[in-house]
Amino acid sequence: MLKDPKKTKDAVVQWIRDYFAKNLPNATAVVGISGGKDSSVSAALCVEALGRDRVIGVLMPDGNQSDISDSYTLVKHLQIRYLEVNIQKMTEAFKSTFLTLPGFSDIAGHEGLAGEAWINTPPRIRMTTLYAIAQSVPGGGLVINTCNRSEDHVGYSTKFGDAAGDLSPLSSFTVHEVLQIGTELNLPESLVKKTPSDGLSGMSDEDKLGFTYAVLDQYLDTGVCPDPEAKEKIDRLNRRNLHKLLPMPTYKKSEDD
């Protein structure tokens, strides 16, 4: 847990401000808004760092999104500009392309583009959308990664999807620390304490992971996990998903090459 949430919040705000000033002084922060704690806290930090005129929220439902009212609540609360891009036609076109692709069923099996491949497609389309908007903004735009340390540790993000971005304000903080920062930012409690869900599987994060964020955060903070089964699963997920966090392996040319 954070010792001084206000001090930490102020430090993150200054870090964002400094990063923009050094790299793209006139750029706008582009944030994908899901209505959950991470995107809410990330957007609020950017507003405090840059001013609301330099933050654009992007709502990206895939068809009907039952909790999209939470996203509206956030952009209204922060008084930021926003765009709503329904990605349903893009995801349907993407999937239908593979369903009619000669030879694809022989490679992928009779189900075609299914399972994790399909679940991970909308987040990648959303990230493509964010970058398209960022590159269209006068003065340039930087895409804000909204992942936190807890989710990153167990790979609860999509590679080249929500795991991508130009800068990541929250990746050093556990879920509970993000909640502390959100409270310090005076965000609506309904957003900060909203039950985390990926919006893809129909399950809560904790149900899908098989352990609570409280257990995960305690393990990350202290190295102690009282539940051996949860510890084994957390370690296994971390090992399996390290490729999302580490730089891409590259072959190093030798003098003999």
Image: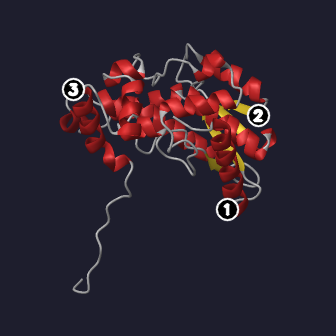
Disc 2 versus disc 3: distance between alpha carbons? 45 Å
Outermost bottom residue = 255
* Circle nearer the viewer, 3 or 1: 3
Query: What residue is shown with label 1?
Result: 23
Query: What residue is shown with label 2?
Result: 81
x and y percentages locating residue 166 in the rendered image? 57, 52
Q: Residue at x 26, y 25 (%)?
A: 227
Q: Secondary structure at mark 1?
A: helix
Outermost top residue = 66
Quarter of image, res 51: top right
- Residue nearest the observer in this picture, 73 or 130: 73
Vertical side of 13 occupied by 39: above or below: above
- Residue nearest the observer in this picture, 125 or 51: 51
Question: What amino acid is at disc 3?
Answer: Glu
Q: Mark yes or no: residue 73 visible.
A: yes
x and y percentages locating residue 245 in the rendered image? 39, 49
Q: Residue at x 33, y 25 (%)?
A: 209
Question: What amino acid is at disc 2?
Answer: Arg
Vertical side of 18 occupied by 149: above or below: above
Quarter of image, res 180: top right
Counting residues from the start of the chain, the first of labels 1 and 2 encountered is 1
Counting residues from the start of the chain, the first of labels 3 and 1 encountered is 1
Disc 3 versus disc 1: distance between alpha carbons? 45 Å
- Residue nearest the observer in this picture, 221 or 132: 221
Query: What residue is shown with label 3?
Result: 229
Is disc 1 in contact with disc 2, using a CB cutoff of under 8 Å?
no
